[in-house]
Image (cartoon, helix red, strand yellow):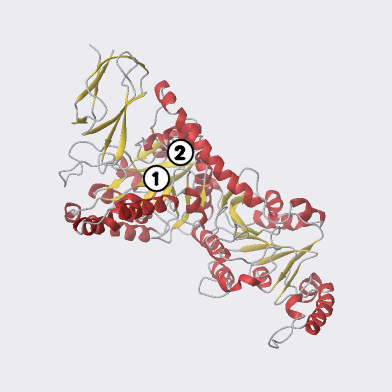
Amino acid sequence: MGEEVLAPMAGKIIKMNVEVGSEVEEDEEIIIIEAMKMETPIYAPCDGKVTKILKKEGDEIEEDDQIAIIE
Amino acid sequence: MRPYFEKMDPFGKELKKGELKRTESNIKEIKDAEEVIEEAVEKIKHIGLPTEKINSRGQMTVWQRLEYLVDEGTWCPLHSLYNPLDNEEGSTNVVDGIGKISGKWAIIIGFDNKLMAGAWMPGQSENILRITDLSKRLNLPLVWIVNCSGAKLPEQEKFYANRRGAGTPFFRHAELEQMGIPILAGIYGTNPAGGGYQSISPTILFAHKNCNIAVGGAGIVSGMAPQGGFDLEMAESLIEKAKTHKAKPPGSVKTHYDSTGFFRYVYEEEKEVLDGLKDYMKDMPAYNPKFFRVAEPKAPAYPDDDIMRLLPIEPKRTYNFDQILARLVDGGEHSEFRPDYGPEVYTGICKIDGFLVACIANRQGYLGKGYPEYADYPGIGGKLYRQGLIKMNEFITLCGRDRLPIIWFQDTSGIDVGDIAEKAELLGLGQSQIYSIQQTDVPMMLVVLRKGSAAAHYVMGGPTANRHNAFTLGTVATEIYVMHGETAAVASYARRLVKEKEAGNPLDPVIDNMNALAEKYHEKSRPLFCAKHGLVDEIVNLKNLRKYMVAFTGGAYQNPKSICPQHQMILPRIIKG
């Protein structure tokens, strides 16, 4: 079971820096959400490979929505 | 109180590989932008006559004098780009800052003798006002390097008279002296009229052998009563008179050392004047730092280069302020005040060079579910809400009680707005904060890390709303405006859009105006604009922020007018619980 990347807040995904298969390092910026006029980056919670992406750029998301999985 | 301060709570953490990778581009953007500022400052240093020309006359430039006078590594320039009345020369013709002389902090200012022999220029008196205020606020001696040819006559209407005009430094010198703050003046060159008063108003005068100071210079002495205009005969007569007086300008050392004794000392060599100032600075009233230090000075726990990674230059990007602060304060240690309340604001006590300071800052990013507690909408850092304002009011009040200097870090988009926010008393709490600040009477320094906006710029230690702001720094990411340009465009043109739409008119002209207004806001909020117009006192490289914090803190503790014994401080005990 991989590590889930969850939305910290409601907003809109404006940038997805990774795709399935991307290798990431812990704390690397992988997704950017826009909410309340500010851009909030989401960082990789661990080193690994992105195995699943459940949302795409432009999607509106709710807090705690699953966005990706890193293994 | 050693257990409270010797080893405080560690905070911040080392940057991880991923963080280093994703911040590479930000470092480059910050460095590029800092280079633009550095180039602008460098240009100011080269205005007027070349250094070689001044040196060939046997004189040093103001820059050379400062370099010789100020202790190495301590100079923190201020107002380098200040030019509020847009002088074509790009400067107000004074060079100033805070630095140490003979180991003691001083506020230092000198006329730029490369440009019009150090003339009064438009905007200069405002610059000097900032410096006399700084001296007053930090209770530090003011050291002048006088070399002032008097008013730039063709533009006298812009600065000669008025409530804050060019004569006010003399009154302000008197005011500082009334308060017991000494003013030392090293005097060079020809100083007639305004230059004469500039020379005579300080407390002790150190003269170079070739200087002169006078009520009026050779030009005025050789002048004549107005006769309705000039003709050739009068011009010839003027030439003769001017030649005579040029040979013997009034107020030389012979007059003001031998006869009046206004000059306390006269020196043969330029450097000896500065040695005289250095010698007097040794005896300036100052506590030994150990009197107020709470611990041995320590370097920050993490590299200062990291700050260029941690502060996104892109204004919409959120970041972790605590990580930045950990790279500015001694040992990456602090004691945070009410960490579980008002999450949009950081309040805590830290050490700078072994001295205690209070730090207050906006935090950034999402503030978590259920906050602000009074609203059904989410809160985001940079904005101020009820709890943050209450927390700051409490903290400021306790800092006043414990006599702790305050360093503010702003990156704020404003105070929460709307009827819900009104019911939560934010208008009243904002003004309460202005009152709390005013009550403290402790020195404060402000860094506008990125945004300084709306009333939040006032209530968070801004220079606009209190007498306690010693100076304000900006960074290359700074932008200061009443609101974002696009918000202003909406506020200004939304109704117009409705009217035009209802009238069936094209909307393009209104949209063009909206874009033009937003663009104007952008241009007039940028770091160079802020520095030129005095919205900040200096734009500082992120790596140099701590240097200014050290100067501010050391200055604030050098000779404070009011003290709180460490063992009688209440704030550390409240934090401990």
On screen, residue B511 versus residue B76, left or right, reads left
**Which quadrant, please, contains the N terminus of chain B?**
top left
Quarter of the figure with residue A35: top left
- Mark sitting on residue B313: none
Check whether the beta carbons of the residues at disc 1 and disc 2 lie within 8 A of each other.
yes
- Residue at far top of view: A1
Q: Nearer the viewer, residue B457 or A20?
A: A20
Tell me the residue that label 1 is attached to: B359
| Amino acid under disc 1 | Cys
**SS of the residue under disc 2:** loop
Q: Which is nearer the N-term, disc 1 or disc 2?
A: 2
Quarter of the figure with residue B7: top left
Q: Chain of mark 2?
A: B
Q: Nearer the viewer, residue B226 or B473?
A: B226
Residue B100, position in %: x, y? 61, 50
Instruction: Name the residue: 28% across, 35% down.
Output: A34
Instruction: Name the residue: 33% across, 59% down.
Output: B434
Query: Spatial distance from mark 1 to mark 2, Cα to Cα?
Result: 10 Å
Say whether residue B178 is visible: yes
Residue B483, position in %: x, y? 34, 53
Q: Chain of mark 1?
A: B
| Above or below B112: residue B235 | below
Tell me the residue that label 2 is attached to: B329
Q: Nearer the viewer, residue B518 or B268?
A: B518
Q: Residues within 10 Å of mark 1 (few under 14, many from 20)?
A: many
Say whether residue B353 is visible: no
**Which quadrant, please, contains the C terminus of chain B?**
top left
Residue B23, position in %: x, y? 43, 29
